[in-house]
Image: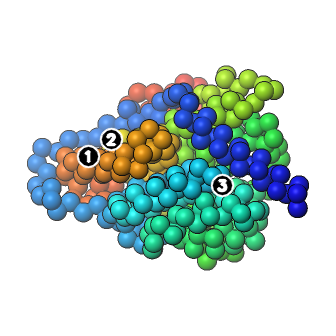
Amino acid sequence: MAEQKRASQIRSQRKEDHVNNFHRSNFERDQYFDDIYLIHQSLPEIDFDTIDTKTVFLGKEINFPLMINAMTGGFDGAMAINKALAQVAKALNLPMAVGSQSIAVKDADYSSTFKIVRETIGNGPVVGNLSGFATTEEADIAVTMLEADGLQIHLNPAQEICMPEGDRNFSGVLRRIEAIVHHLDVPVIVKEVGFGINKQVAKALYDIGVQYVDVAGSGGTNFIQIEDERNTQRDYREMYQWGNPTALSLIECAGVEGRRGLTASGGIASADQVVKSLVIGADMVGMSGPVLRQYLDHGQEGVYEYLSDIIHKSRVMMLLQGASDIETLKKSPFRVTGHLRELLEGYRFGRT
């Protein structure tokens, strides 16, 4: 028991280190949203006040396809963070996902830092979170803990391999995910943690019944850098550019045959990027790092104002594309330019 408690304390400290290292981090990478060109409509023939941004996510109606994505939990300070973010999600009627619940699944003493989300948000959509190494039994515990409407399974080999105490064996993960998909009564969402899901991985996930893929492309929180801050054995700075850019991952995954739900995340921080994500293929947009930074710098009110501003400006851009609702917006024309076009068409090396 003492050994298990010590392991939990180490994991808890690691989670707190992640938040602190994130707040100090300043590395940025291009997500290539600037290479997406939207078409202006001079005759929108729409009353701005009638624009409808409501959609359904995990069986529940929400006000806008924007989710406060997985961030934290499992240490003392996480309680305040998750409560504040859940209050914003409730006020705006947006879904919220928690950070990895693995620590609370193994040690119930940490469960309150996750349960606070459901207690605060009421009946709004709440999404649990576990790693790709989770078992069906652990998935049951995570979903029950939150009365979750869905469960995220995160893929983070780039983070783990750069973590001094991280996993080294990534075999069998797809089989574990498939077992959870067929075991749970709630939808399973598989997400990256900031290095981008490619079309081959997306196809494999949809083929086993995963309902949502969250591309979580590079351009946002960089977990190689965050783990590098904790690593005294090696310097991984040369790998800070690693990963598939968000816009590239999104367009590729949107074209996968038989695709289901698709979430865009990975450094998305503005209304422009939210709208472009929906136009080029996303059904939902997730934001984590920019939301956490707003909270750490400006508190709960800052997060509310930030997300409210994004939603308002998104509605403005919907008007300027002649889109009166989300489904119409998703059918808007767009063009791809620059380096993103080169990546999509394989110009550089003649390969796809």
**Do labels 2 and 1 touch, CB within 8 Å?**
yes
Q: Amino acid at mark 3?
A: Gly
The spot of residue 159 in percent (x, y) is 69, 40
Front label number (2 vs 1): 1
The first of marks 2 and 1 along the sequence is 2
Element assignment for label 3:
loop
Q: Please give the residue where the numbered disc 3 appears in the rendered image.
A: 74
Badge 1 amino acid: Lys
Name the residue at 55% across, 64% down: 116
Closer to us: 283 or 238: 238
Name the quarter where the C terminus is drawn.
top right
Q: Which residue is mark 2?
A: 272
Across and down, in percent, residue 2 comes to 88, 57
Find residue 313 and name its label: 1
Q: What is the spatial separation of the Cα atoms under label 3 and label 1, in whole angstroms?
A: 34 Å
Question: Which image quadrant is residue 14 in?
Answer: top right
Tell me the quarter of the picture where residue 148 sits: bottom right
Disc 3 vs disc 1: Cβ atoms closer than 8 Å? no
Q: Is residue 76 left or right of residue 38?
A: right
Instruction: Provide residue 311's location: percent of width, then percent of height.
Output: 30, 51
> Residue drawn at (20%, 60%), measured in percent from left and top?
51
> Which of labels 3 and 2 is toward the front?
3
Does residue 246 appear in the picture of this structure?
no
Could you tell me if residue 137 is visible in this image?
yes
The residue that appears at 41% across and 50% down in the rendered structure is 300
Q: Position of residue 321 (x, y in %)?
A: 22, 48
- Label 3 and label 2: CA atoms lie apart by 33 Å
